[in-house]
Amino acid sequence: MPSYVVTGASKGLGFAFIKQLASDPANTVVGIVRDMVATEEKLKKHGIHNVKIYAADITDLPALEAAATEIQRTVGGIDYLIANAAFVSGVTSLRNLSDFAGRPEVLRKDMIDSFSTNVVGFINTVNAFIAGVRTGQVKKVIAITSGMGEIGFKAGVNMAIAKYSAIYRQEGILVFGICPGSIDTDAQNASNLNEEDLKRLQAVGAKTIAYAPHFKGPVSAEEAAKRVLAIVEMARFGDGKAGTTISQTGTDR
């Protein structure tokens, strides 16, 4: 009976993870969210009754540690820790650094918020739950990253993945990252963008196609979750994934 802990489980890819995992009654599924009441109502609406929900923000280490302690008490070991929670900026997305030449404090705050959640938040998550992973049978830690988080961009979370892998692989804990690809979510809905941002999104799309000609556009959260979980299930030491970040194809791009 494998156990899964998924952070950022209230919506988008995170909710797709727990929905898919909960479809197998043999799985023990735990979601970490900021709004427990809203998430529980959403689960009830979808007829999902076998997911345990705990409230914690990944920037709040004591809250994560409290959740981890309770999970170990009630669930036991953690087979799969999926660090999915992330901060997606509505301020700097689709913009260049030069666009903030006259607003340095806006850029500074947004960059700090992003680093605090996406890098420090991942570190908090691993530090809080690693004791549970140690007592699990499968022992896998997966960080959900983004296309801008490839090693070539020297992203902080990728460095954390590599360091954690080096620390814990001797204990049989497999740590790696997966970029799920472009996902069709509300944040990407063109109807939510103004004309300028829509043009920027189209430009990004053109660059993406040039980089990856096989790209056919965003997929549903359900499809992305299915792809990622298949990779997670098959990953083993010796296949080159430990300490790295791979794409939704299971390769480095």
Image (cartoon, rainbow, N blue to C red):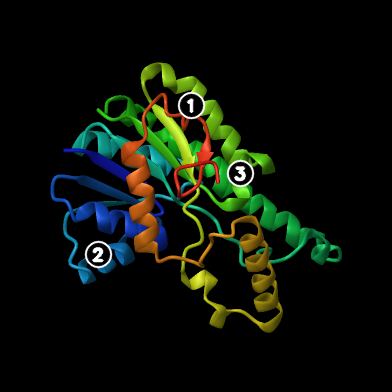
Tell me where residue 204 sits by quadrant: bottom right
The residue to which callout 1 is attached is: 165
Return the x and y of residue 177 as percentages of the image width and height: 48, 40
The residue to which callout 3 is attached is: 150
The foreground one among 207 and 56 is 207
- The single residue placed furthest to the left in the displayed view is 25
Return the x and y of residue 112 as percentages of the image width and height: 67, 50
At label 2, which amino acid type do we have? Leu
Q: Residue at x 61, y 44 (%)?
A: 150
N-terminal of the two: label 1 or label 3?
3
Verify CB contact (< 8 Å) between mark 1 and mark 3.
no
The Cα–Cα distance between marks 2 and 1, rounded to whole angstroms, is 33 Å
SS for callout 2 = helix
The residue to which callout 2 is attached is: 43
Q: Quick check: 248 left or right of 112?
A: left
- The single residue placed furthest to the top in the displayed view is 170
Q: Quick check: 16 left or right of 213?
A: left
At label 1, which amino acid type do we have? Ser
- Report crowding for label 1: few under 14, some 14 to 19, many 20 or more residues within 10 A (C-alpha): many
